[in-house]
């Protein structure tokens, strides 16, 4: 059965899903997006996703395509039509269709599209072995706190990582790690988690937010500050987080093993705590 895609009020087979060549998302990357995990046929952490897209829309002066309640109902209907038990729902909002002009068009309805993907989030074999990351220059704009659909720099970073045989690229400026191409970055030193503090330099990631909350609840030391590539290479552990990886151990950086080259105890604990929390929300 063909996957069903949501396009501006209609649920259609993916082969029939189309947007205008004059859509500003296509022409300018003028839009924002969100990814909501699905576990046990339930959207999880959706409240965080609603809050973040609300902020992103506000930061670029873009209207909601519907009410917040309708937004979640649409995404749940999309999940149900595709029978996604575990995976994610992706959606994006653009400034709509208008003749190509850099200035915002007046009175133009936003465009709203979404699709689903089935994917194993919990039983991910990479969580047992860990993954490799490589350092790549951070080429992005200065408002990385907005979840923009304009992801060319991240695509370049990810492709460089893949071409070097790695799972992820850790972007850096002046020797300091900002974040991953599609994830947040963390190191562990002396049982303390270290991750960069929020600013316009990084995305206010949902998994990062929850990891900080879990660390506080379980008396796990955590410090929000930039860390260098040299610190990362000398760390006791390293890990990354995202909607589709949850908490993922990093075992090599630029080909050099992190400590003994195996997932560390703090990383494994954070993944276990996070999965327990998700299972409670999803009633599984």
Image (cartoon, rainbow, N blue to C red):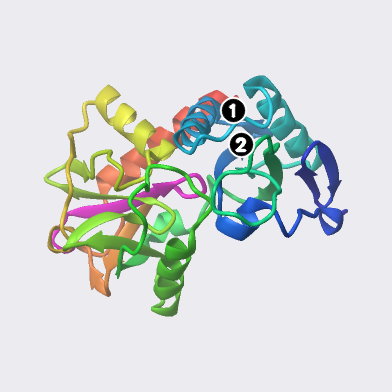
* 117 over 208 or under it: above or below: below
Callouts 2 and 1 close, C-beta under 8 Å: yes
- Residue 248: give x, y in percent of width and height: 39, 52
Give the mark nearer the N terminus: 2 vs 1: 2
- The reply to whether residue 167 is visible in this rendering is no
* Quadrant in which the C terminus appears: top right
- Residue shown at 66% from the left, 27% from the top: 72
Q: Report the residue at 48% width, 64% height from top.
A: 152
- Residue 157, x across and y down, in percent: 40, 67
- In the picture, measured across the screen, residue 99 lies left or right of residue 281, that is right
Q: Position of residue 88 (x, y in %)?
A: 62, 44
For the residue pair 203 and 245, the one nearer the viewer reads as: 203
- Residue tagged 2: 39
Q: Nearer the viewer, residue 102 or 279?
A: 102
Q: Which residues are magenta?
A: 233-246
Q: How would you rate the neighbour count of disc 1 (Cα within 10 Å): few for under 14, some for 14-19, many for 20 or more? A: some
Q: Quadrant of residue 191?
A: top left
Whole-number angstrom distance, CA of label 2 to CA of label 1: 6 Å
Residue, disc 1: 282
Query: Is 244 included in the stretch rendered in magenta?
Result: yes
- For mark 2, give the secondary structure: strand
Residue 263 seen in the figure = yes
């Amino acid at each position: 059965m063909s996957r069903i895609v949501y396009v501006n009020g209609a649920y259609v087979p993916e082969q029939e899903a189309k947007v205008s060549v004059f859509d500003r998302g296509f022409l300018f990357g003028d839009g924002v997006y969100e990814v909501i995990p699905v576990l046990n046929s339930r959207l999880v952490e959706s409240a965080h996703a609603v809050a973040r897209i609300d902020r992103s829309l506000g930061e670029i002066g873009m209207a909601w395509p519907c009410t917040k309640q309708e937004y979640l109902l649409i995404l749940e209907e999309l999940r149900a039509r595709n029978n996604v038990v575990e995976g994610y729902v992706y959606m994006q909002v653009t400034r709509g269709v208008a003749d190509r002009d850099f200035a915002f068009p007046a009175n133009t309805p936003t465009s709203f599209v979404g699709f689903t993907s089935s994917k194993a989030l919990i039983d991910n074999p990479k969580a047992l072995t860990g993954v490799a990351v490589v350092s790549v220059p951070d080429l992005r704009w200065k408002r990385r706190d907005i979840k923009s659909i304009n992801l060319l720099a991240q695509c370049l970073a990810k492709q460089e990582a893949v071409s070097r045989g790695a799972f992820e690229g850790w972007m850096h400026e002046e020797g300091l790690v900002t974040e991953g191409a599609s994830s947040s970055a963390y190191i562990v030193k002396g049982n303390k988690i270290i991750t960069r503090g929020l600013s316009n330099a990084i995305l206010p990631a949902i998994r990062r937010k929850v990891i900080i909350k879990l660390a506080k609840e379980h008396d796990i030391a955590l410090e929000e500050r930039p860390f260098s590539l040299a610190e990362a290479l000398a760390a006791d552990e390293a890990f990354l987080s995202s909607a589709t990886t949850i908490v993922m151990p990093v075992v090599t950086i630029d080909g050099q093993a992190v400590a003994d080259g195996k997932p560390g105890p703090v990383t494994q604990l954070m993944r276990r705590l996070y999965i327990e929390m998700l299972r409670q929300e999803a009633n599984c």
